[in-house]
Image (cartoon, rainbow, N blue to C red):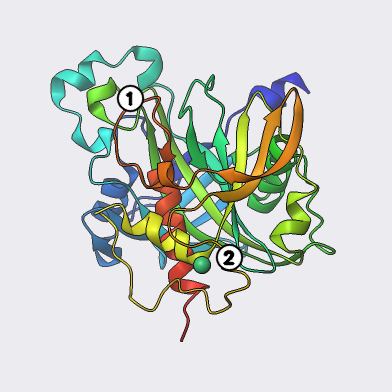
């Protein structure tokens, strides 16, 4: 259905004094809104605890305690975070007035991303193609938008299939799936690169597979218009990526590979993954790791997205603690 395809999910929130949903505005930071409404759930200036659920093509965010008042639908709780440099948070009055009316009326859209962990504890990342309108050359997990009626998981599996050609069958190939956290994402990601054009809340899932990285790697078929290449990182490399960004701190005992067989990459050596060569996806062992540590704020620069680092941090802290 054409209509259904163009319908985009919008973020709503529930003010404390009411039970009705309110559409989130493009020009307001949801971290700010939820902190004002739910003072008790503030974790830091840029983080707040939220409950979220999908309802009637809306992603509804509320205080964790508020959700009890609602129906019996399943609600997930997690941390909603934004970067300290969030352009929406930093907009001044003049910049607000300079947003086009179209942009101001966009609302806040919803995305989903899947931190896929192989049976041998490697995470799959994909580099967005250089021709992408938003976040070109940036490393992210597979993901995209949510179609009306889909669950977070169904949307993540559909997008992953479209981008990397892998069919995720929850019964045969997935052992675990859960919400990791929510990220407030804006494009361009820095105000110095121009006024905001896109404003999303991205749902990060952690999905644990039953196959090894090598087994999954041999099945990847990249959609080259969207994905330039894919790579696997082990927990130590995830830790280095998170720690390369001064806004994130990690416990010392997070992210040590305890099995030297699965951690076959040390230092800055290249990564296993896939690339597109003459229209075909081919396996490679030479994806450079170093650009994943880049903090250079340029629009075309290869780097790992800040939301991805946030998700990797949550993964290391909850699923990959060594003791
Ligand atoms: Zn390792």
The image shows residue 294 at horizontal and vertical percentages of: 35, 42
Q: Is residue 145 visible?
A: no
Image height check: is 63 above or below 27?
below
Name the residue: 73% across, 57% down. Answer: 214
Q: CA distance from mark 2 to mark 1?
A: 41 Å
The image shows residue 198 at horizontal and vertical percentages of: 42, 27
Pick the front one: 37 or 146: 146
Image height check: is 219 above or below 96?
below
Pick the front one: 147 or 248: 248
Question: In terms of secondary structure, where does tag 1 sit?
Answer: loop
Name the residue: 33% across, 12% down. Answer: 100
Pick the front one: 155 or 306: 306
Tell me if 157 is positioned left or right of 123 in this view.
Answer: right
Q: Earlier in the sequence, mark 2 or mark 1?
A: 1
| Mark 2, residue position | 264
The image shows residue 224 at horizontal and vertical percentages of: 68, 27
Quarter in which the N terminus is drawn: top right
Label disc, if present, on residue 196 of the rendered structure: 1
């Amino acid at each position: 259905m054409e209509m259904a395809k163009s319908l985009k999910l919008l973020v709503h929130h529930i003010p404390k004094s009411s039970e009705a949903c309110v559409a989130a505005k493009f020009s307001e930071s949801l971290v700010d809104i939820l902190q004002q409404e739910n003072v008790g759930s503030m974790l830091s200036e840029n983080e707040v605890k939220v409950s979220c659920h999908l309802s009637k093509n809306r992603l509804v965010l509320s205080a964790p305690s508020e959700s009890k008042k609602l129906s019996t639908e399943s609600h997930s709780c997690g941390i909603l975070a934004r970067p300290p440099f969030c352009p929406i948070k930093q907009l001044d009055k003049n910049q607000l007035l300079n947003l086009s009316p179209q942009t101001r009326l966009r609302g806040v859209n919803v995305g989903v991303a899947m931190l896929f962990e192989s049976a041998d504890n490697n995470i799959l990342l994909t580099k967005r193609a250089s021709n992408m309108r938003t976040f070109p050359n940036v490393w992210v997990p597979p993901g995209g938008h949510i179609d009306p009626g889909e669950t977070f998981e169904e949307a993540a599996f559909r997008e992953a299939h479209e981008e990397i050609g892998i069919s995720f069958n929850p019964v045969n190939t997935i052992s675990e799936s859960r919400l990791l956290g929510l990220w407030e994402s804006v494009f361009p990601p820095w105000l110095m690169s121009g006024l905001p054009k896109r404003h999303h809340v991205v749902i990060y899932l952690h999905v644990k597979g039953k196959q090894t990285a090598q087994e999954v790697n041999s099945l990847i078929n990249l959609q080259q218009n969207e994905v330039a290449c894919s790579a696997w990182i082990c927990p130590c490399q995830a830790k280095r990526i998170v720690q390369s960004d001064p806004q994130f701190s990690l416990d010392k005992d997070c992210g040590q590979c305890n099995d030297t067989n699965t951690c076959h990459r040390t230092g800055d050596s290249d990564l296993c993954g896939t690339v597109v060569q003459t229209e075909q996806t081919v396996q490679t062992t030479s994806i450079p790791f170093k650009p994943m540590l880049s903090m250079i704020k340029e629009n075309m620069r290869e780097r790992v997205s800040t939301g991805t680092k946030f998700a990797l941090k949550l993964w290391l802290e909850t699923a990959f603690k060594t003791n």
